[in-house]
Amino acid sequence: MAGRVSSAAGNCTRAFLLPLLYIIIFKYVPMYGAQIAFKEFNVTKGISGSPWVGFAQFERFFQSHEFWRLLKNTFSISLYTLIASFPFPILLALGLNYVRNRRFKNTVQMVTYAPYFISLVVLVGLMLQFMDPRTGLINTMLGWFGAGPYHFMAEASWFQSIYVWSHIWQNVGFSCIIFLATLSGIDPALHEAAVIDGASKMQRMRHIDLPGIMPIAIILLILNTGQMLETGFEKILLMQNALNLRSSEVIDTYVYKVGLVSQAMNFSYATAIGLFKAIIGFVLLLIVNQTAKKLKQESLW
């Protein structure tokens, strides 16, 4: 008996070792390079040989004329995405949970899951084609009603809505999987008792399903808030153009441009901006987690 316990413990240790090594190598070791945010990094001198400048890179960013615009665009896109996308996976999961026709349910799941696997490059290409002011399907349909054409991608005021709702369309099906799994774990006896008492489907959703998935929903909300400033660099960069830059330039795209695209290739400045964004995300995570604890909801710790 003791031998079997010891063998099981050894297997668990070995199984835990690989993900632990992954976290150490790819998450903690790269933190060594974050110190260039406090230096005037020179490639030839390396990280250790570059001169220390303290918070000069951060002060440069805070005093930049781009600072408030980047912060405003990043927060508005992130908050818009968080608020708009949070309820839709829950609503889709609740709806699918009560569908009894398996063929219809599988079809809806396939249709809603499929966009998640579309490459962002392909997705943005499709969006540009559909919203083309001359040949796009959307403007063609608007023309039937005597409206348009509109150059959607050239309007800065349209950018955030296009980004957020295309994000919801692409991710809502895949995001609802975890809620469907949670709903399947709710005790069927609760629903049977509710049906016997004459409860409608809406009442069962409100009093059984929603309380059942709320802990998972709160945890996901906390995690998403911690990543709120991660706006989806690739998609925004692909959607950007000179006409919508006023509302589409965010911290991630700015870091990419000043760190890699510009001739100066200022790695220290770009790292300082990225580190500032990470600190803000960590603070938001702490605030939301503490708020959830005070409201007696699920929390990360």
Image: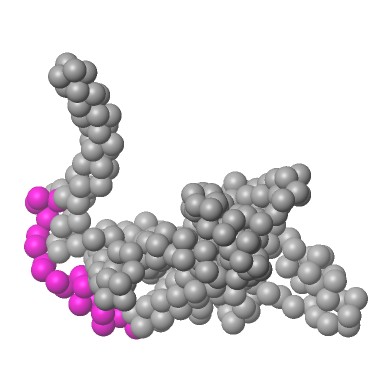
The part of the image, by quadrant, that contains residue 87 is bottom right
Q: Position of residue 290 (x, y in %)?
A: 25, 72
| Res. 286 in view | yes
Question: Along the line of sight, which residue is nearer the eye, 216 or 55?
Answer: 216
Q: Does the stretch in magenta take in 215?
A: no
At a point 31% along the width and 76% down the height, the residue shown is 295
Q: Indicate the quadrant containing the N terminus: top left, top right, bottom left or bottom right.
A: top left
Q: Indicate the quadrant containing the C terminus: top left, top right, bottom left or bottom right.
A: bottom left
At a point 53% along the width and 62% down the height, the residue shown is 209
Say left or right for 46 vs 135. Answer: left
Q: Is residue 21 above or below residue 89?
A: above
Say left or right for 257 vs 290. Answer: right
Count the marks: how many? 0
Q: Does the stretch in magenta take in 54?
A: yes
Q: Which residues are magenta?
A: 47-65
The part of the image, by quadrant, that contains residue 277 is bottom left
The part of the image, by quadrant, that contains residue 20 is top left
Q: Position of residue 91 (x, y in %)?
A: 60, 65
Q: Is residue 291 above or below residue 17?
A: below
